[in-house]
Amino acid sequence: MALVSEFLGQLTLSYSGEPEPKYPTVVPARDFDPARDAARIDTAIKTKGVDEQTIIDILTRRSCEQRREIAFEYERFAKKDLVSALKGALSGSLEALILGLMKSTAQYDASELKASMKGLGTDEETLIEIVCSRNNEELADIKRVYKEMFKKDLEKDVAGDTSGNFAKLLLALVQTRRDEPSNVVDYEKIDEDARALYEAGVKRKGTDVVTWIEIMSQRSVPHLQKVFERYKSYSPYDMKESIRKEVKGDLEKSFLTLVECFENRQLYFANRLNEAMKSKGAKEKVVTRIIVSRCEVDLIKIRTEFKKHFKRSLYQTITEHTKGDYQKALLSLCGGDD
């Protein structure tokens, strides 16, 4: 017992209930004039062959609020909707990126989730990435906006599109029942959860997935970080190795995404970007989704993690794996070389 108390004595946790600080690459432009921007975009759209550069320069260097004001001004004098006008003027990956910027972060995530569950077959990769990497506050926003945009509950759509333990895990996360971090470190609870995770998985034949889901969807992130540390004193494998041994398929991917995000969310996104730009081209949908959804949240930190782990900057990597106007837009959102 002395060992346990000694170990627990080393664990301290400093956390105040503040919202997570933001590390955006896209910030509000100074000397902002929405009417002037709207007029320049109108001219760019009407130019023979479309002046993509002007559209990119303006929309990738304005905050979400500012883009909304530009859209309002545009509609006022052009008498048509800016999003429809951009759809008509642009195409391919550039169009997807620019239209993504015309939504708020929560609207964009909600649209991506909706698209991943549309039609035949589910795009599990997108579903896992968004549901498993967003925090309580982000998920609550996404749910609210999803309902406003599609007149449906996100939970119902997820339940209708997935099955088994994979569905149970996603639903548990979408229900946003995660504890808020506390200044009090509950060492007994840390030990109890670590042991429960071990006894529900590696220790027994078969896996008691429900226990895993409950702990990973309800405990606060700082608490879980301590639990995974403590887990190593029960199990011969760390949490990620245990997940790989115990479960497979989408469930495995989901649990791994969760653990990676609990440990270092920005590193998770850096890894996803690196994976998406490994081969000759790029998985443009993944690159667009991460850059657009994180540029006003934490893309500066994602860039830092990227450089640290892959020994080259995100900026250089985008330059090597993309081209044309799409590349220019991504580089502008990336906000600089490291």
Image (cartoon, rainbow, N blue to C red):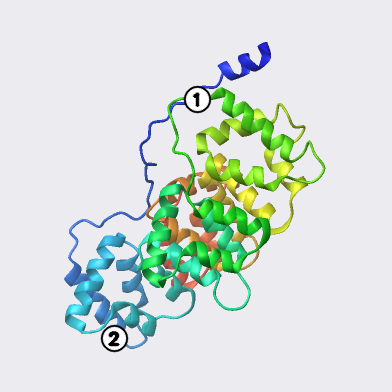
Quadrant location, the N terminus = top right
Q: Position of residue 253 (x, y in %)?
A: 66, 54
The picture places residue 112, in percent across and down from the top left corner, at 48, 67
Residue farthest bottom in this picture: 48
For the residues labelled 1 and 2, the Cα–Cα distance comes to 61 Å
Q: Is residue 27 left or right of residue 328?
A: left
The answer to whether residue 221 of the structure is visible from this angle is: yes
Above or below, comparing residue 77 to residue 292 in the picture: below
- Residue that label 1 marks: 185
The location of residue 250, given as percent across then percent down, is 67, 58
Quick check: 111 left or right of 121? left
Determine if residue 62 is in view: no
Give the quadrant of residue 103: bottom left
262 versus 165 height, above or below: above
The number of numbered discs placed on residues in the rendered structure image is 2
Q: Can you tell which quarter of the image residue 69 is in?
A: bottom left
Image quadrant in which you'd find residue 111: bottom left
Left or right of 158 in this view: 15? left
Q: For mark 1, give the secondary structure.
A: loop
Q: Which residue is mark 2?
A: 46
1 or 2: mark nearer the eye: 1
- Please, what is the three-letter code of the amino acid marked with disc 1? Val
Q: Residue furthest top?
A: 2
Q: Amino acid at mark 2?
A: Lys
Residue at point 45%, 65% (across, down): 153
The residue that appears at 22% across and 70% down in the rendered structure is: 37
Frontmost residue, 189 versus 124: 189
> Which circle's residue, 1 or 2, is located before the other in the chain?
2
Rendered position, 283 above or below 226: below
Residue at (43% x, 76% y) in the render = 95
Q: SS at mark 2?
A: helix
Q: On the picture, is 242 further left or further right than 12? A: right
